[in-house]
Image (cartoon, coloured by chain):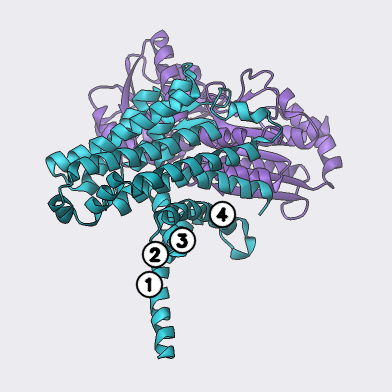
Chain colours: A cyan, B purple
């Protein structure tokens, strides 16, 4: 794999690391399987692109995109908490509604940013190539996001959220307002995913309404890969594992497609993704019997 | 003159240009060329475009596996994958990159500012911000727009149906190319005395419903070059036959599948015209100085069996002009 393809894999891996962190919040912390992300990712891209094209400062546009994402998360949480609609179904409903909303926001299926100023534009003149600036910028952004998220999750409020996901009845018995925790967690999760969409639009020069397809699978794959490779109870390590999982997923994908010896074709891509996720899911289970085997040998 | 004729036989336009390239192309044929093609989805029309590019290169002295590296990857409908493929291609280092469709082209354009890009099957390159001036693109990018000859289509439909007033157009509102076509068509149609009735189908599973919604609302159905609708064309055709709504199409391939008629190009020709531009760049031309070409073609395809099934007669004048009569 060339340096450029490697940097590209890292860049896209870092963008989707934001998705992974969002998915981690909903799936793992809140125990809320949330498919809204397939809609909030293009929502973030759509809001950012539309605002930038109409002359809004790119930083402000990105912030508004995150607010829009948070609103999407709130809608799903509202449907679930207030009306008791099954979380999976509530999130699917929001997701399909967002497809139309994204089209409305953009007014057309594809808004181009290729000739527009983005949050990255000022950094392009520092003597580095665009291919180098993009991953560096995203890496810095991820470090900030991971640290903030870590601070949040180890705070009292964050602990209450983790308790809500782990055992809602127990959490309520301890005086935690669980529905408030679900609202906050879902808003935060989808704000992160919308931020990913906003960064995708700005690093790739376009927002396309179809770009949400499979976001959830990629996010989950990253979370599971990270969990498989780094088994830890320390929150900072768990969050970092999500980021690394996302990058590794992209690198593995690039390798699979770049290695002629494997005989893989372009049309095998979806299969490769599925197999990657399945392997990551099975691996922890395989490791455990091995462990007991070793232990059994010792005794 | 001889070699110009030889080249023009295969190519409907740009024959002369291709001929010129042929003369230098043979000289260059000893050098290795590397061309990487990517499309947003795999789809008969887009695959035909890719094959067209390869065939033009093959006919001009490049043999795949010998002096030509020809790579193809599809993003499987996912723009994030398109972005990754774009970076891979740029990293591999090719002489010419050929992205097929709008999102693939945009991903490619953001991945490199110096490697030559020849986009194709992009309906509105200016709207997609790939180029600001189609006549002088500048930079590293040029390509081919597949904007349908809508005026020719409206002329043809008017010739078939002198009294019709309502054109039903099923399309995917999520597809950039299709929306450009429908918007343009709606602006042009009144000049021909037509009204456009839109029917949205976001997924191929919705195409049947969209076509059915046009029964009673439209006098005919026009299928634009929309990936979603074309991939579920049979659903539209069955509605057309049941309700006696003649179905016209934007591309010639669809007439072979059962639409009544159209005039224009197929995507294999688009690929060939793209291949001509690729050749020019392999021969040393600067992509920024090659104007963006609008795909051309004036093949008139008619399908008499389809016309009969949909209760419409093919005017004798059209029958006489037809270049291809589908059996």
**Quadrant location of the N terminus of chain A?**
bottom right
- Indicate the quadrant where residue B181 lies: top left
Q: Residue at x 42, y 42 (%)?
A: A148
Disc 4 crowd rating (10 Å Cα; few below 14, some 14-19, many 20+) is many
Of labels 2 and 4, earlier in sequence is: 4
Q: Quadrant of residue B163?
A: top left
B189 w.r.t. A13: above or below: above
Residue drawn at point x = 62 percent, y = 46 percent: A7
- Regarding residue A83, the answer to whether it shows in the image is yes
Disc 1: which residue:
A285
Read off the residue under disc 3: A276
Q: Chain of mark 3?
A: A
Q: Quadrant of the C terminus of chain A?
A: bottom left
Q: Which residue is mark 4?
A: A251
Q: Which mark is residue A281?
A: 2
Label 1 close to label 4 by CB (< 8 Å): no
Q: Secondary structure at mark 3?
A: helix
| Placement of B54 over or under B214, stated as above or below | below
């Amino acid at each position: 794999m060339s340096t450029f393809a490697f940097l590209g894999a890292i860049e896209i891996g870092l963008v989707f690391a934001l998705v992974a962190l969002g998915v981690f919040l909903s799936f793992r912390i809140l125990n809320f399987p949330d498919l809204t992300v397939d809609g909030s990712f293009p929502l973030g891209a759509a809001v950012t692109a539309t605002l930038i094209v109409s002359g809004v400062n790119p930083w402000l546009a990105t912030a508004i995109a995150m607010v829009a994402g948070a609103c999407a998360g709130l809608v799903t949480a509202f449907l679930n908490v207030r009306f008791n609609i099954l979380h999976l179904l509530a999130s699917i409903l929001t997701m399909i509604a967002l497809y139309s909303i994204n089209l409305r926001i953009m007014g057309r299926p594809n808004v181009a940013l290729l000739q527009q100023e983005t949050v990255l534009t000022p950094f392009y003149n520092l003597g580095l190539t665009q291919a180098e600036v993009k991953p560096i910028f995203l890496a810095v952004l991820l470090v900030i996001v991971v640290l903030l998220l870590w601070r949040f999750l180890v705070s009292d409020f964050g602990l209450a959220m983790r308790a809500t996901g782990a055992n809602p009845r127990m959490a309520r018995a301890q005086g935690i307002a669980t529905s408030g925790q679900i609202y906050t967690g879902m808003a935060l999760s989808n704000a992160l995913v919308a931020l990913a969409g906003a960064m995708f639009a700005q690093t790739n020069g376009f927002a396309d309404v179809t770009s949400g397809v499979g976001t959830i699978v990629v996010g989950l794959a990253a979370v599971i890969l990270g969990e498989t490779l780094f088994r830890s109870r320390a929150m900072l390590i768990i969050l970092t594992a999500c980021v690394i999982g996302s990058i590794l997923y992209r690198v593995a994908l690039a390798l699979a497609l770049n290695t002629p010896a494997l005989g893989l074709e372009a049309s095998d891509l979806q299969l490769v993704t599925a197999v990657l996720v399945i392997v990551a899911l099975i691996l922890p289970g395989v490791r455990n019997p091995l462990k007991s085997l070793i232990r059994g040998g010792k005794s | 003159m001889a070699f110009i004729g030889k080249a023009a036989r295969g190519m409907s336009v740009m024959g002369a240009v291709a001929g010129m390239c042929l003369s230098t192309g043979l000289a260059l044929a000893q050098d290795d060329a590397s061309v990487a093609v990517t499309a947003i989805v795999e789809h008969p029309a887009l695959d035909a475009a890719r094959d067209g590019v390869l065939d033009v290169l093959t006919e001009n002295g490049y043999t795949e596996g010998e002096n030509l590296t020809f790579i193809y990857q599809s993003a499987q409908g996912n723009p994030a994958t398109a972005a990754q493929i774009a970076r891979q291609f740029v990293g591999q280092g090719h002489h010419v990159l050929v992205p097929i469709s709008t999102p693939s082209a945009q991903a490619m354009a953001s991945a490199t500012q110096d490697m030559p890009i020849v986009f194709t099957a992009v309906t509105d390159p200016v709207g997609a911000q790939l180029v600001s001036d189609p006549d002088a693109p500048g930079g590293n990018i040029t390509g081919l727009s597949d904007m349908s000859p809508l005026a020719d289509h409206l002329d043809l439909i008017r010739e078939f149906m002198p009294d019709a007033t309502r054109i039903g157009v099923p399309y995917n509102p999520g597809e950039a190319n299709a929306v450009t076509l429908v918007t343009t068509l709606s602006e042009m149609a009144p000049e021909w005395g037509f009204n456009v009735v839109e029917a949205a189908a976001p997924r191929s599973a919705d195409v049947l419903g969209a076509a059915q919604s046009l029964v009673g609302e439209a006098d005919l159905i026009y299928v634009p070059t929309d990936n979603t609708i074309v991939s579920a064309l049979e659903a539209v055709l069955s509605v057309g036959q049941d309700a006696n709504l003649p179905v016209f199409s934007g591309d010639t391939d669809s007439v072979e599948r059962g639409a009544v008629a159209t005039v224009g190009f197929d995507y294999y020709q688009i690929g060939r015209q793209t291949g001509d531009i690729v050749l020019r760049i392999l021969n040393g031309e600067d992509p920024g100085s090659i104007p963006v070409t609008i795909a051309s073609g004036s093949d008139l395809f008619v399908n008499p069996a389809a016309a009969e099934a949909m209760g419409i007669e093919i005017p004798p004048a059209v029958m006489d002009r037809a270049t291809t009569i589908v059996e």
